[in-house]
Amino acid sequence: MDYKALSLLFLIFLVSTEARPIEDQATFANVNEIVTEHYELDIFIDFSRKVLSGTNTLYMRRTADSLDVVYLDVWDLNIYQILDQSGNKYEFHIDDPNPNLGQRLSIFIPEDLSTSETFNFTISYETSPDAQAISWLSPEQTSGKKLPYMFTQSEPILARSLAPFQDTPSIKSTYVVNTTTHVQFVTRVSGNMTYDYTDCMIRYSTFEMNIPVQSYLLAIASGNLVERKVGNRTYVITEPEEIEKVANEFSELEDFLS
C-alpha cells in the first residue's frame, strides 16, 4: 500500500473540506454572506382569523466583503413592509413557491449600504391560516372545551411559515418574543418569561432566549394553559384538565438534565 499517496489524498481532502462554504439545499438564505445573531418577534395571536400578525426584527452581521441582497426563507407569508433601524424602506421580492421549500424573500441593499457591518430589518408580515408550523384547535378539540388552542411545531423547515428567517440549522440566534392576545388566553414561548401584563382585556407577554438556537426550536403555545413546577429547572405546561396527568408523566424530567 502506498502510504505516501494515501497521506497526500487525505491532506487534499482536508483542505477541500475546510474551504467549502456551508451548503444547505433546504434553505434559500445566503448564510455565507450574512448571519442572524438575534431577532425580536412581536406578534398578535388572532384566534378569530387563525393568523399571527406583527413584525420580526432581524439583527444581522455581514460576513462577505459587500452585500447587495439578503435572502430569507418564507412560506405563504404576507410581507407588507421592510424597514431598517432608521426607518428607511427596503425594496423586496418574493419568488414563486417551491412546494417542498416555500419561497425566497429577497431584500435589496442600496449600494451606499453594501459594506455596512450590521443590518437590522423590521419585517411587517402576517401568516397564512394554513401555515404549516401552526396548529389551531377549536374548543371542542381541547380537553376543557372552553377556549381554542394554538401551538407551533417548526421542525424541520417549517419556521419559515411562522416568520421570515434564515431557516437552517447552520444559523443560531438569541431572541425576544413579545405576544399580544385577548386576556383569557395564556401564552408560553420556548424562553424565560420576563413580562406579563393585562390592560383593557388584552394580555401582553415577553419571553427571552439568551442561548443561540436554531429557528426550528422556537415554540409558541396559547390557550387555556396552566403550568406546574416539577423540578428546580423544569415545568410542564398544559390545560388545567391535564395538569395532574402530565406532571406525573414528566416527574423525572429534572433527572434527565442532571
Image: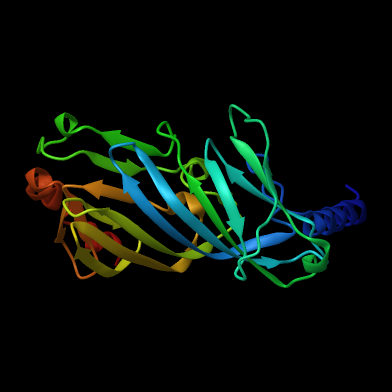
- Give the residue at x 9% y 38%: 144
* Colour scheme of the picture: rainbow
Q: Is residue 167 visible?
A: no
Residue 241 lies left or right of residue 225; in this view the side is: left
Q: Position of residue 53 (x, y in %)?
A: 42, 48
Give the residue drawn at x 45%, y 68%.
211
Q: Is residue 104 left or right of residue 1?
A: left
Q: Residue at x 38, y 39 (%)?
A: 134
Which residue of the protein is positioned furthest toward the top in this rendering?
99
Q: Quadrant of residue 123?
A: bottom right
| Residue 90 visible | yes
- Horizontal side of 5 relative to 258 (left or right) equals right
Say which of 145 and 230 sits in front: 145
Quadrant of res 227: bottom left
Q: Residue 182 at what x, y percent from top left? A: 22, 51
Give x and y (percent) for residue 142: 16, 35
